[in-house]
Amino acid sequence: MAELPATLTGLQRALGQRQISGLEAIAAQRARLDRMESQLHCVVQTLYDEPRDGALAGIGLAHKDIFDSDDRRPGVGHDSGSIIRGLKPAPVLARLRRHGASQLAALSMTEYACGATGENHRFERCVNPLQPQAAVGGSSSGSAVAVASEMAYGSLGTDTAGSVRIPAATCALLGLKTTHGLLPLHGVHPLAPALDSVGILTRSAADAAVLLEATAESELLRPAVSEALRIKAWIPEADLHPSVAAALEEFARDCGAARRIDQWSGHQTLTHLAEIVLHVEAAGNHRNALLEGAASPAVRAVALPGLVIPPDWYRAALADRARRARAFVDEHLREFDIFLIPALPHPAPDWDIVSTTSPDFDARQLLALHRYMSFVNYLGFPSVVFPVARDDRGMPISVQLIGRPFHERNLLAFAHRMESLRFGSNGFTRPFLIQG
Amino acid sequence: MTTSEPSTDNVPNRNREARDLERQRLAKTLQRLHGAASDAMQARLASPHDTQPTEFSQTLNALSHG
């Protein structure tokens, strides 16, 4: 076939109809990855595994370089990984392989997952395939670049304070942060274990659903409801760029949000609690490097505050977590299935604004990338980000939908409906690439 | 007439020693501050992805059914 389909499910159909064989599909994907890597710089190491049978045979995936794989310890954005004979793959990767998927590459990331962009001075800066001057969100930056540029059909990343959702929002992708504990974290390098979760980046909601079903503990996943989903929207207009506020207003109207609020006082408290846990656990992980003065600026920015946060604050933040999760459901998800909120408060920024070494660096813009993200990790709930509009430069404006724990199927079913209505059958991303 | 001898004092070395001392002092301070937190943290990080159900994971499970 002349061109590979835009989506994973489209390729599955083509394979099922024998328009292309699994081996041919993988060969074509490897050729594309090799061709594009020299332009986009998102690959840490190209990987090869034996073709296998299964529902995902012929599907090429590439993952953030944070997962153990066969005989390979990941570099976690610090180096290029190392050979460890006998090392077993992380269970999430093993599950994908059992379904026949091929892992094409390990992908670049922010050092030790510490950062909201893909900035990492140990590696060449990865390039946003939508617009080269646009920043790539982090820390799963290589995942976003590889999937948006169609080098891979999907990617697993990790999300501790937005590290799947922020890169997805900057590259017109769907980014799914799963419920804490739904996907196993064994063999995944930790940043803040209480907040870490494995996430999925794809170009369409149906693709994410396929990867979710292949990797999740299926007995935990709740069935999707068949009736119309009830939506509550929080659109804090005063905090949002006018183009983001307008896009969210229009989307909330179009999807029939039954209730809309612009004030929610709980957000700031939950964000502070998330920050306490993040900083203290990151400090525990990087304690020796911090005390020896060997930690990089990216690691210091996330972990150093954790050394001086009073231990009681950390213990209290964890002790209060279950109560806060119940209160959040009572306030927002008892009468509603989905809580719709912003993904980013501003349009996706350019590198010169959020790169810490740029003369035009604006720390507020960098920190703003996390603003609507980290509290979701504290709550442990699932959330999905996907584009709904374009800003005046043609870059994506995304929404974020939060659901009750283990209700990922509802979120993805809703995202699929919106994707079909707004973008047709080729996924979210191609319209942005064509325009860009 | 006297001429001043070139100083034998090595300024870069002196600066480095001062920095090292400062770093050691800071490290001790941080270790003292962090000590109490680190016992619980180190235990947690020793098995970061413990599969034992916690109160929080049980809460998430309960909320999924609610």
Image: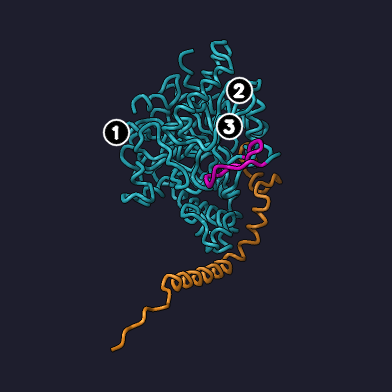
Chain colours: A cyan, B orange
Mark 1: few/some/many CA within 10 Å (<14, 14-19, 20+): few
Q: Which residues are magenta?
A: A68-84
Of callouts 3 and 2, which one flags the residue occurring earlier in the amino acid sequence?
3
The chain containing the residue under callout 1 comes to A
Mark 3: few/some/many CA within 10 Å (<14, 14-19, 20+): few
A40 left or right of A277?
left
The residue tagged 1 is A392
The residue tagged 3 is A47
| Mark 3–mark 1 distance (CA, rounded to whole Å) | 39 Å
The residue closer to the viewer here, B48 or A254, is: B48
The chain containing the residue under callout 3 comes to A
Q: Which mark is residue A125?
A: none
> Is residue A199 depicted above or below A7 in this figure?
below
> Is residue A16 depicted above or below A256 in this figure?
above
Disc 1 element:
loop
| Mark 1–mark 2 distance (CA, rounded to whole Å) | 38 Å
Residue A147 in view in this figure = yes
Residue A343 in view in this figure = no
Q: Amino acid at mark 3?
A: Leu
Is A270 magenta? The answer is: no
| Residue B11 sits in quarter | bottom left
Q: Amino acid at mark 2?
A: Leu
Of callouts 1 and 2, which one flags the residue occurring earlier in the amino acid sequence?
2
Disc 2 element:
loop
Residue B22 x, y percent position in the rendering: 49, 71
Q: Amino acid at mark 1?
A: Asp
A308 left or right of A265?
right
Mark 2: few/some/many CA within 10 Å (<14, 14-19, 20+): many
The residue tagged 2 is A56
Q: Are marks 1 and 2 on the same chain?
A: yes
Q: Which residue sits furthest bottom?
A: B1
Quadrant of the snapshot with the C terminus of chain A: top left
